[in-house]
């Protein structure tokens, strides 16, 4: 009996040790799988910068806009559906300017690409009080069954009684876009130098621009669909839009709203406030490449034939051949800047710097990256510089490493063309880690 009892003890100890070893192996696998890889080094930009904290306690700030009304206010849109005001004195107004949380599709706080994604003020906002938002609403009744949500381009007016409040009852839906999947929603809004409203739409989600809700040639290449495009709309009439007479497909061959196509997820873009007022679009890539494009009317930027300047591949070793032209023989336009996922996972578009605080940055395109694979946030800040006929890319050295542990979410610009960086430490619209920084000289 003693011998049998001793054998049982040994077996229990052996099983315990085996379980511990298996748990250790599983933990090591998870640690190696999700540990962010060592980021690839880039040349450092010659001028370091610093980040000055302007606001915190937000959740997922994704837009910063000025109303251009001489008030000095900055409006910050949080992905959760709330727009906050930061006064000229740098204080956040306690009450939201607009709260759309009850009109949004239910968001996943762990990770979600839906929400309040776009905000822009009419160039004559001071006179007419008009502004526009783009947000993810629940799936409309007329949408295809089983699709994910319906995005709304909506117009509002400011309250006649309080300039720090929007009139909720003034909402007018200008455009509804049914989305087959949760991701790749774009959402950027901007007024161009022509006075028209520009809107970026992703390809509808999923992978490879394929599957439910995706055309055989991919939504990005299908000019009969709005997904995967930059749209240009004339919103001179309150509560509706018209198609500009010189849009590329106004006479046929595609949807009249389309300005440019062949894009995967043009999440953030901007017009240069100086120079030739060029349109810089950061198009978030898939498995291998991130890109920044100079977008012009009627051009095809390649998705899903190409990712960046390369044929679409599922992995780095999966070499493919692909067409150099679209379905109509049109050339596929390559990016001005691209980088691999050794550098970062998702490009975040910014602005060409036209401010006065850091004169060394004048004419440089300032942008960033969301962060590397894994659980640790690792946002990066870049400059793209034009020299001759090409562009080069450098990384900023940031004083005090204020971006450590943060994801870069978006950039903003004030009336003096100084730049702001929006960030948080979570992978989704949850928590209160959201921050707004202003780019300032490093001392």
Image (tube, rainbow, N blue to C red):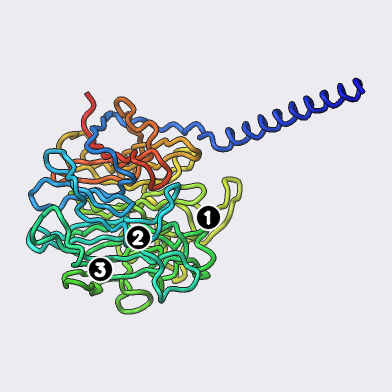
Q: CA distance from mark 2 to mark 1?
A: 34 Å
Residue wearing tag 1: 312
Q: CA–CA distance between discs 2 and 3?
A: 24 Å
With respect to residue 295, does 255 lie above or below?
A: below
SS at mark 3? strand
Question: In terms of sequence position, does the residue under pointer 2 or pointer 3 come before the other?
Answer: 2
Quarter where residue 200 is shown: bottom left
Q: Which residue is mark 2?
A: 104
Label 3 neighbourhood size at 10 Å, few (<14), some (14-19), many (20+)? many
User: Which residue is pictured at 22% across the width and 61% down the height?
Assistant: 132
Residue at the far bottom in the pictured view: 251
Q: Compute the Cα span from label 3 to label 1.
A: 31 Å
Residue 30: give x, y in percent of width and height.
Answer: 60, 36
**Foreground of the two, 408 or 263:** 408
- Please name the residue that numbered disc 3 is placed on: 233
The mark that comes first in sequence, 2 or 1, is 2
Question: Residue most toward the front?
Answer: 1
Residue 24 spot, x, y in % from top left:
66, 29
- Whether residue 50 is visible, yes or no, is yes
* In this rendering, position of residue 98 left or right of residue 251: left
Pointer 2 local density, CA inside 10 Å: few below 14, some 14–19, many at least 20: many
Q: Earlier in the sequence, mark 3 or mark 1?
A: 3
Describe residue 339's horizontal placement relative to residue 86 as left or right.
Answer: right
Q: Quadrant of residue 377?
A: top left
Res 387 visible? no
Q: Secondary structure at mark 2?
A: loop
Percent x, y of residue 284? 41, 51
């Amino acid at each position: 009996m003693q011998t049998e009892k001793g054998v049982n003890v040994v077996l229990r100890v052996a099983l315990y040790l085996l379980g511990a070893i298996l748990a250790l192996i599983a933990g090591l696998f998870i640690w190696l799988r999700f540990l962010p890889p060592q980021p690839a080094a880039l040349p450092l930009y010659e001028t370091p910068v610093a980040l000055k904290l302007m606001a915190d306690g937000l959740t997922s700030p994704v837009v910063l806009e000025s109303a251009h009304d001489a008030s000095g206010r900055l409006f910050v849109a949080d992905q959760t559906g709330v727009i906050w005001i930061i006064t000229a004195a740098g204080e956040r107004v306690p009450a939201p300017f607009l709260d759309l949380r009850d009109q949004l599709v239910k968001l996943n706080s762990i990770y979600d690409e839906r929400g309040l994604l776009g905000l822009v003020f009419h160039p004559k906002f001071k006179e007419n009080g008009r502004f526009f938002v783009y947000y993810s609403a629940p799936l409309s009744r007329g949408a295809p069954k089983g699709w994910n949500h319906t995005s709304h381009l909506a117009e509002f007016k400011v309250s006649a009684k309080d300039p720090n409040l929007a009139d909720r009852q003034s909402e007018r839906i200008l455009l509804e876009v049914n989305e087959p999947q949760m991701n790749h929603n774009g959402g950027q809004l901007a007024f161009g130098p022509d006075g028209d409203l520009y809107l970026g739409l992703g390809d509808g989600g999923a992978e490879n621009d394929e599957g439910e809700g995706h055309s055989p040639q991919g939504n990005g290449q299908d000019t009969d669909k709005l997904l995967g495009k930059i749209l240009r709309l004339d919103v001179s009439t309150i509560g509706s839009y018209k198609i500009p007479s010189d849009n590329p497909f106004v006479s046929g061959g595609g949807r009249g709203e389309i300005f440019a196509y062949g894009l995967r997820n043009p999440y953030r873009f901007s017009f240069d406030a100086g120079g030739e007022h060029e349109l810089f679009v950061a198009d978030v890539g898939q498995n291998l490449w991130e890109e920044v494009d100079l977008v012009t009317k009627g051009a095809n930027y390649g998705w899903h034939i190409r990712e960046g300047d390369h044929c679409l591949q599922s992995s780095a070793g999966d070499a493919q051949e692909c067409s150099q032209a679209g379905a109509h023989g049109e050339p596929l336009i390559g990016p001005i800047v691209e980088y691999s996922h050794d550098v970062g996972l998702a490009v975040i578009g910014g602005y060409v710097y036209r401010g006065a605080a850091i004169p060394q940055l004048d004419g440089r395109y300032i942008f960033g990256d969301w962060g590397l694979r894994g659980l640790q946030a690792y946002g990066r800040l870049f400059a793209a510089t034009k020299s001759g006929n090409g562009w080069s890319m450098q990384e900023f050295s940031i004083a005090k490493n204020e971006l450590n542990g943060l994801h870069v979410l978006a950039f903003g610009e004030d009336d003096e063309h100084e730049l702001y960086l929006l960030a948080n430490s979570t992978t989704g619209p949850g928590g209160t880690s959201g921050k707004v920084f202003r780019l300032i000289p490093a001392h």
